[in-house]
Image (tube, helix red, strand yellow):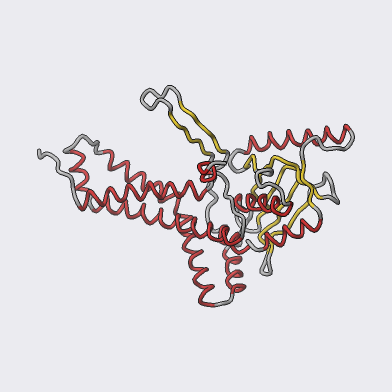
């Protein structure tokens, strides 16, 4: 897998420390995006006369200023919840260092996350079954010594996170799939997420229905599954629960952040615009939120930097 796909696909998180760093990075990105967007709006409003004059005395449309205000307003709106969640995560981490009582801070997180919960679901390319209960769904708890973050339900190719807090986490499911490969000692590329319900629920249902049809056909023909599968023993399931318990604190922090899920498509034009006759493209079913929001941060930062440059060193434009 090339570096480009690793950048935009689901996170390749292999240990709890990496998961915790990802949550902190995403929280910082939301705070930075919101702060830069608010700064951009303030700069345009305070220096409105300068930018309107520049646009009127050059070939730039005056509506460009209005577009920038709309752009910053939209980015600030979609990142506001993440920025608030990022500040709360930072406050909890600071409190944990000052109080030196991790359990007490975790209990505060649980109290702050109280409310209705939902679930996230993915579909993988292989059936996952327990050795002692072939063909039956089973559940694994995601819990530590403070409380439960939810349960992960595995039913063939379907893996669902029945969240204990808020909307659940697709990143947690991707981490769980990676841990299955690690526990089994198999190639990490052998078991992969192929459908994300939150991104494409229609495609998810179609894929799951096809897998279930093959399972039912296998039972009719003699009990052997016609779909490739992986089998977990009781000891391996216990090991998975122990591994998932180590990311419970990071999963609670992640619940403060919005679950912005997108499908991605990137193209390479062979013949560039305006002709654009031939182009190469690749579509990913889900873009890693850290990548998508990180790109958004870079774009907002560049636009704000250009505005500051024009304020500090305004370009020469002809007079009336």
In the rendered image, the quadrant that contains the N terminus is top right
Residue at image coords 24%, 38%: 62
Residue 211 lies in what quarter of the image?
A: top right
150 or 117: nearer the viewer: 150
Residue 217 lies in what quarter of the image?
A: top right
Question: Residue 282 in the image: x percent, y percent?
Answer: 53, 33
78 or 229: nearer the viewer: 229
Question: Residue 169 in the image: x percent, y percent?
Answer: 61, 52
Locate residue 103 relative to residue 141 in the image: left or right: left
**In this picture, is 20 found above or below 45?**
below
Question: Residue 181 in the image: x percent, y percent?
Answer: 70, 50
Locate residue 250 relative to residue 295 in the image: left or right: right
Residue at image coords 48%, 55%: 82
Question: Residue 199 in the image: x percent, y percent?
Answer: 58, 41
Residue at image coords 55%, 50%: 259
Residue lying furthest right = 222
**In this picture, is 243 found above or below 264?**
below
Locate residue 123 relative to residue 277 in the image: left or right: right
Counting the numbered discs, the total is 0
In the rendered image, the quadrant that contains the C terminus is top left
């Amino acid at each position: 897998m090339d570096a480009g796909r690793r950048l935009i696909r689901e996170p390749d998180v292999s240990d709890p420390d990496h998961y915790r760093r990802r949550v902190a990075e995403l929280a910082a990105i939301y705070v930075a995006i919101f702060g830069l967007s608010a700064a951009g709006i303030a700069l345009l409003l305070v220096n409105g006369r300068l930018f309107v004059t520049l646009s009127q005395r050059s070939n730039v449309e005056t509506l460009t200023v209005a577009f920038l205000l709309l752009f910053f307003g939209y980015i600030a709106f979609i990142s506001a919840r993440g920025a608030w969640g990022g500040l709360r995560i930072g406050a909890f981490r600071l409190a944990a260092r000052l109080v030196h009582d991790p359990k007490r801070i975790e209990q505060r997180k649980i109290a702050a996350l109280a409310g209705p919960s939902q679930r996230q679901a993915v579909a993988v390319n292989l059936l996952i079954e327990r050795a002692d209960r072939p063909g039956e769904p089973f559940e694994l708890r995601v819990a530590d010594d403070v409380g439960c973050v939810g349960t992960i339900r595995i039913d063939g190719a379907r893996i669902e996170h029945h969240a204990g807090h808020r909307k659940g986490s697709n990143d947690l499911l991707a981490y769980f799939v990676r841990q299955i490969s690690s526990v089994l000692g198999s190639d990490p590329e052998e078991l992969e997420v192929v459908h994300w319900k939150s991104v494409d629920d229609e495609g998810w249902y179609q894929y799951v229905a096809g897998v279930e049809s093959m399972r039912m056909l296998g039972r009719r023909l003699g009990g052997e599954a016609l779909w490739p599968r992986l089998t977990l023993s009781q000891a391996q399931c216990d090991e998975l629960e122990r591994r998932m318990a180590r990311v419970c604190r990071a999963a609670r922090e992640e619940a403060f952040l919005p679950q912005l899920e997108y499908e991605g498509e990137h193209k390479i034009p062979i013949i560039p615009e305006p002709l654009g006759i031939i182009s190469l493209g690749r579509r990913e079913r889900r873009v890693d939120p850290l990548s998508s929001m990180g790109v958004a941060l870079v774009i907002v930062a560049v636009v704000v930097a250009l505005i500051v440059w024009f304020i500090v060193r305004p370009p020469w434009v002809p007079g009336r």
